[in-house]
Image (spheres, rainbow, N blue to C red):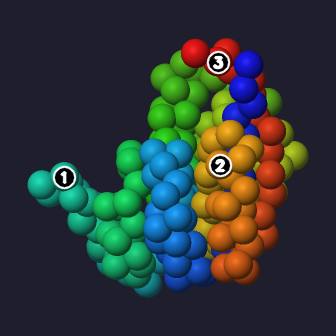
Amino acid sequence: MSIHNSIIAVYDTHTAAEQAIKEIQKAGFNMKNLSIIGKDYRTEEHVVGYYNSDDRMKFWGKLGAFWGGIWGLLFGSALFVVPGIGPVMVLGPLVSSIIAALEGAVVVGGLSALGAGLYGMGIPKDSIVHYESEIKTGKFLVVAQGIGEELTEVQKICESHSANVEFHETMQVAAK
C-alpha cells in the first residue's frame, strides 16, 4: 500500500498562484496531479466565457490572461456555477472528481459539487467548508496530489509564495 496525499494552498491573488504553479512545473512535478480553483466572474464585466481552439483554451473576463496562461499547463478544465459561491473555474484532475460526484449522484451531507469533488479526494468536510469560503471571497486554491515525498517540494514552493498551505492524508491504494 502507498499513501496518496494532497496539499491545498490558498492564495490571495491570482498572480501568486500563477507564479507558484510555474515554479512547481519547473521543479518537475507531474502537472497531471495539479489543480487550481478560483472565481473570475465580475458583475461589471459584460462578457465572460471560454472555448477550445487547437487544444488551447481561450477565455475572456477580468482574469482572462491568467486563466489562459494556466490552461496550457494543467490537464482538464471546467466552469461550474456553485450555489452560494457563483461561477468557479476549475483546472486539473479535480474536474474529474467533481464530474464523478455529479454523474454518480453523490450526495455528501450538504456539500456542493465542488465540495463533493474535494471530499472524493479525501479532504475532510470541515476543511471543505473553509476552502469554499476562501473561493467565495475571491481567493485561489492550488491542489497538488501525490505521495508524501513528492509533495514536500511542492509545499515548500507554495509556502515561498505566501500561501496558507494545508497537508491532507487522503487515501491508501494498493501498490502495483
The local crowd at label 3, few if under 14, some if 14 to 19, many if 20 or more residues have their Cα within 10 Å, is few
- Asked whether, in this view, residue 92 is left or right of residue 84, the answer is left
Query: Camera-side residue: 33 or 87?
Result: 33
- Asked whether, in this view, residue 135 is left or right of residue 49, the answer is right
Work out whether 116 lies above or below 156: above
Using the rendered image of the protein, determine whether residue 81 is visible from the camera's viewpoint: no
Work out whether 172 lies above or below 80: above
Label of residue 150 in the image: 2
Which residue is depicted at the point 75% across and 31% down? 3
In the figure, residue 137 lies in which quadrant? bottom right
Label of residue 175 in the image: 3
Which residue is depicted at the point 63% across and 44% down? 145
- Asked whether, in this view, residue 3 is left or right of residue 70, the answer is right
Furthest-left residue in view?
A: 54
Q: Are marks 3 and 1 in contact (CB under 8 Å)?
A: no
Which marked residue is nearer to the observer: mark 3 or mark 1? 3
Q: Which residue is mark 1?
A: 55
Type of the residue with mark 1 = Asp
Q: Secondary structure at mark 2?
A: helix
Type of the residue with mark 3 = Ala
Disc on the earlier residue, 2 or 1 = 1
Mark 3 to mark 2: distance in Å? 16 Å
Work out whether 79 lies above or below 142: above
Q: Secondary structure at mark 1?
A: loop
